[in-house]
Image: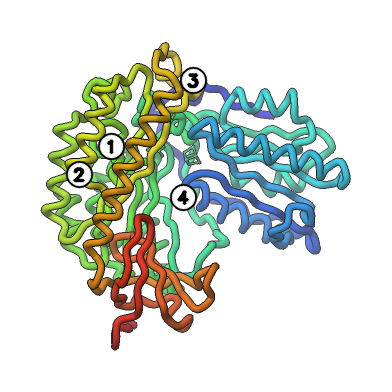
Amino acid sequence: MHVPDLKEARKRTKEKVVEKKVDYTFSKNFVGKKYFLRTYGCQMNMHDSEEIRKYLEMLGFTETMVLEESDLVVLNTCAIRENAHDKVFGYLGRCKHLKREKSDLLIAIGGCMAQEESVVSEIKSKHPYVDIVFGTHNINELPKLILESKKKQEIEVYSIEGDVYEGIKYSRDSNITAWVNIMYGCDKFCTYCIVPYTRGKQRSRKLEAIVAEVEELKNAGYKEVTLLGQNVNAYGKDLEYGYDFKDLLEKVAETGIERVRFVTSHPWDFTDEMINTIAKYENIMPYVHLPLQSGSDKILKQMGRRYTKEEYLTLFQKIKESIPNVSITTDIIVGFPNESESDFLETLDVVNACKFDSAFTFIYSPREGTPASLIKDTISMEEKEERLQRLNQLVNQYSLENNKKLEGKVVPVLVLGENEKDKNKIYGYTDTMKLININGSKDLIGKIVNVEIHEAKSFSLDGVVAKESVEN
Ligand code: 5AD
Ligand code: SF4
């Protein structure tokens, strides 16, 4: 048994990361059995679930979307805010209930919550019916843990840093767009954030390995890749090869795959060369997710963000001016401890200046073990909620305004599938990452087509396929 340890997780040694290969030599013992996989949180987690799904399929399981039909439940959890915790523990209640009726049901918990000391001790003391707990550093041990699962609870979570695995197989959600990890972990240690503890130190994959994966995806017919990292602009800084994110972007673009995207950017590491590279290549999409978090210099400093309001605005302007037609989205936290009304107004000021295409907005949630969680807070929850509402109102106003400017325009869209509610419609994303519902034929799924935008809403667009627009 290995349990997580926050002190260990905080350490950053100079020791080199070891590149490892996953061992796929396990037996197919579960033919005829069903698994139910539930994923919480970000794209990183969704991509980890594609790895988990592959292991389960290789063990012989088939997927069910109905919890009650399953022989194995895997919850891939998120730790970013308290409400993510609450959702998982709420769901676990349903699983416990099911296990009373189905005693050989296996329950496994993985992901970021499994990396938290307090969560694991809660599982040990209050949820003995959970069979397996595995962490973000040892997803590849899940087959072994399932195969060896006995009647007692198995906890295998490692806190130190982690390695880089190559040759991972995935059972991907889509055959059109694919996520590609370019790095794991994060060394930024923003004072509110749990990720550097749950995902370990920054470990970049080698450039050649990433490019080879993109080539393989392109050859398999994929149209789009999204390069994934907590902080993609810092890519390569932990390696000794002298290349950085700009070099990686160039090499990935030169594979000729039709669309290249990347998330998430950190303003601190965003260089002019990176901006120019995004502008230069047609197949690097004009879309940047650039978290602001706060517009107040005082709060930014306390958050450990390493930039000022002015520096953020300067970078924003540079990106807008250099990349034609770019759309920029952001993340904002309100109610950081002791955020005053005037601090909050500074945030609104940046929103007014940037007019973001959209923004993910959150009320600050203290995470155990992070420095910010120790700050005594004097602002009431009512006040925080009221600020969130005011912020959302402004954010939505600009989303709509930006989208309205697109009415009547023709934009390229990668069509991803059928609209769930209206089977006569298909949906996709514009180059600028806007969701669009289209009157058009299912034959266009997987293709990039030009779409004329008829109506713009705050969170989506409606359009029709422009005549003679199919490019491929
Ligand atoms: N409380 C609220 N929001 C948070 N985020 C990260 N940590 C916290 C926290 N403790 C937000 C940030 C980040 C996004 C993924 O989640 O805005 O960019
Ligand atoms: Fe993703 Fe962060 Fe949630 Fe972990 S805590 S799953 S990294 S959003």
Callout 1 amino acid: Leu
Is the CB of mark 4 within 8 Å of ligand 2?
yes
Judging from the image, what secondary structure is the residue with disc 2 in?
Answer: helix
Q: Would residue 129 appear left or right of 441 to someone viewing this image? A: right
Q: Is residue 467 above or below residue 113?
A: below
> How busy is the neighbourhood of tag 4: few (under 14 within 10 Å), some, or many (20 plus)?
some
Judging from the image, what secondary structure is the residue with disc 1 in?
Answer: loop
Front label number (4 vs 2): 2
> How busy is the neighbourhood of tag 1: few (under 14 within 10 Å), some, or many (20 plus)?
many
User: Number of numbered discs present?
Assistant: 4
Disc with the residue nearer the chain's start (3 vs 4): 4
Marks 4 and 1, how far apart in space?
19 Å
- Give residue 412's quadrant in the image: bottom left
Q: Which residue is mark 4?
A: 43
Q: Which residue is mark 2?
A: 354
Q: Which residue is mark 1?
A: 292
In the picture, the quarter occupied by the C terminus is bottom left
Find out whether the residues at labels 1 and 3 contact each other: C-beta distance under 8 Å.
no
Q: Which residue is mark 3?
A: 369
Q: Is residue 236 visible?
A: no
Disc with the residue nearer the chain's start (4 vs 1): 4
Residue beneath the point at 24% across and 59% down: 286
Disc with the residue nearer the chain's start (2 vs 1): 1
Q: Would residue 45 appear left or right of 107 to someone viewing this image? A: left
Marks 1 and 3, how far apart in space?
23 Å
Find out whether the residues at labels 2 and 3 contact each other: C-beta distance under 8 Å.
no
Marks 4 and 2, how far apart in space?
25 Å
